[in-house]
Amino acid sequence: MDLVTANNHLATASILEQALVATATATASNVNLYSATTDSVLASYSGDSNYLASSASSAMWGKVLTPAVSLATSPSNPTPGSSVTITAGIVPSSVGNYLPSGSVSFYDGATLLGTASVSGGQATFVTGALAAGVHPLKAVYAGGGAFATATSPIDNLSVLLQATMSCTPTPSSYVYGSGFVNILVTIQGLAGHPIPGYNENVSMYMDGGTTPIITEQGYWNTSTSSAVNMYPLTPRWASIPAGTHTFTLQYPGDATWAAASCSSVITVAKDPIGMSYPGQVMSSLSPSN
């Protein structure tokens, strides 16, 4: 007896006669059939001197894989209304000659954000509709071909509010060694939200440096608006040489607010030198005189 599918010869088995009932068992090896559909298996008996030839068919289900679905977002801390790319990965991305097909639906909680087709084991969706707050994102793969439906773990994406930060030096210039300058830092947020920058460190950098010359945790002077913080920072001016310098102040952000920065330009003039002689005072002389 031969056991075949529509396209393949699977095995040949011998018939064992027992009373009026005869059975045959065939074992097929190296059958790699991944499909969400069925195939028809045909058993064919060639007959003998007492029995005519005969055949019978049966359905055989293909093997379906249940993949894992991963989820990634970029950027990792977006602001409201900004473009966010959400990518779902189907693992494994292939089995033999079989590739995942179909589509992936992207959800924010129970709200459908959109649907994208699978290509190369991935599906990508871009949205600009995420408001401030935490968004529980997930991807649901609909399945296709040899792959069953699957859902990704929840990815909690924080969309941060964007504060506006400004720096105001007072004064904007001074003579080397003659005093100090305050830089008033203002972080403007949105009414109805927690005050940005409260008890957060603000770091100051000079002339593009990567090491802060001062970092302070502000005891913020809160203005009449609940959305504004102001704090004066005073660098160690004795170590600031004469010249024009750019000071950059950086607010690191928190669970609600994105990081922000601002810059101020301050000019430090050279200190005029005064020299005294008996009975006479001479000022603004250079050392060579």
Image (spheres, rainbow, N blue to C red):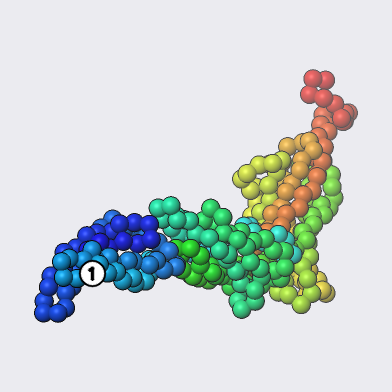
Q: Residue at (79%, 20%) from the top-left corner?
A: 288
Camera-nearest residue between 39 and 115: 39
Seen as rendered, the residue at the extreme top is 288
63 relative to 261 in the view: left or right:
left
Task: Say if residue 201 shows up in the picture.
Answer: no
Identity of the residue drawn at 53% across and 53% down? 120
Q: Residue at x 16, y 70 (%)?
A: 50
Residue 20 is left or right of residue 141, and the answer is left
Screen quadrant of the C terminus: top right
What residue is disc 1 on? 52
Viewer-closest of 140 and 282: 140
Locate residue 27, reporting x and y percent.
22, 63
Q: Position of residue 98 (x, y in %)?
A: 45, 56
Instruction: Identify the residue shown where x is 57% and y is 66%.
Output: 104
In x, y percent, where is residue 190?
78, 71
SS under mark 1 = loop
